[in-house]
Amino acid sequence: MQLGIIGLPLSGKTTIFNALTRGHAEVANFASGKLQVHTASIQVPDSRIDVLTKMFNPRKTIYAQVQYNDIAGLQRGIGEKGGMDGGLLGQIVINDALVHVVRAFPDDNVPHLEGSINPARDLENLDTELILSDLGVVERRIERLKTSLGKGGSTPQEREANTKELAHLEQFQKHLEGGGLLRDLDLSAADLKPLKSLALTTIKPVLVIINTGEEHPDTALNNIQYGHKQTRVVALQGKVEMELAQMSDEEAQLFLQEFGIAEPSLPRVIRLSYQLLGLQSFFTVGEDEVRAWTIPIGATAVEAAGTIHTDLAKGFIRAEVVSYDNLIKSGGMAEAKNTGVLRLEGKEYIAKDGDIMHIRSSL
């Protein structure tokens, strides 16, 4: 899973990046205007993996991974005149979801480019830039499709596919021209499949982080009305969280208590990100390895098998399944089998979060 961190210049994006990744990327007090991307992959914290590791004592433990990409500040006006630079757009659209950092902290040493602190305004401004960028992409694709359909020479299947795509894009165009975000449209996976190659930004799920710096975040959300679909909004003390991320576990615990922070930002942001993307975890266990795997909610047993290895999906016979809770209550795999909570499931079984699975395959 890749998450792209975006925001207007001096919003504290890199501070949030460092807080989430325990990184040390340079935090500047000015906007460089250059396309810079900081990248870091981190383990997804999951206490269930820790418990399973103690139970099975494997040779290695592998957590799920999340990659964060801190993308250079998006200046006002980037979406105008045909859309944003191809390099910048490419860095944004490769992500599964976006983390939009919005500034809500005053700092005389880092003056806001708009002259005042107004999170609602900044949120709207960046959305507008992304809408304009998407509109440019959609309009250019509509022109190419109309030209192709007008020339003829394509197969009936190609004409049918192009006609369907054109209808979707004209719907997109109307929605964007009205100032709408594409993720607010009700589109099925089948609708989106032929459009995945387009560099569209407002169709991506978004986690909005209101960065309060050192200020307490309790009141930061009061003036934010942002009810878009596939969106979550959270307030974080960015500067405090960055300091916290550099501490030892013992120091961090004392720090959390002192500042009244319930939990560090990383688990909360990852949990919200999984919710946004409709993801869940299942586990494989044994003497060799305890490992977490990430799959979509609603994935079948055979799809889970394919996540481990394509051959397991091709030769799928059955899946041995026990829930994490039942395994812990039983005290071990043998006990789970004896008490009947370890069961055999077929390829159409819908995997649940926390399932522990062993795939039987003919390959």
Image: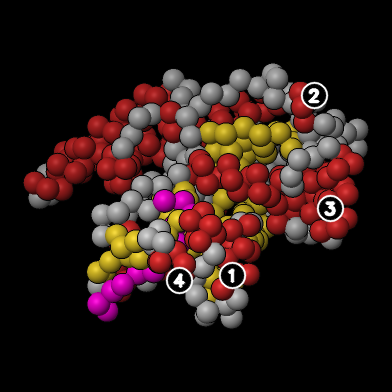
- Residue name at image x 15 percent, y 48 percent: 158
Q: Nearer the viewer, mark 1 or mark 4?
A: 4
Q: Residue 320, image x and y in percent?
A: 35, 65
Decide which of tag 2 and tag 4 comes sooner along the chain.
2
Circle on res. 55:
1
Q: Coloured how?
A: secondary structure
Q: Nearer the viewer, mark 1 or mark 3?
A: 1
Q: Secondary structure at mark 1?
A: helix
Which stretch is magenta? 352-363
- Residue name at image x 25 percent, y 72 percent: 315
Q: Secondary structure at mark 4?
A: helix
Decide which of tag 2 and tag 3 comes sooner along the chain.
2
Residue 250's place in the image compared with 278, above or below, is: below
Q: Nearer the viewer, residue 157 or 302?
A: 302
User: Label 3, label 4: how many angstroms apart (C-alpha)?
Assistant: 39 Å
User: Label 1, label 2: how many angstroms apart (C-alpha)?
Assistant: 54 Å
Q: Secondary structure at mark 3?
A: helix
Quick check: can you spot residue 85? Answer: no
Circle on res. 116:
2
Quickly name the residue at label 4.
334
Q: Callout 4, which amino acid? A: Ala
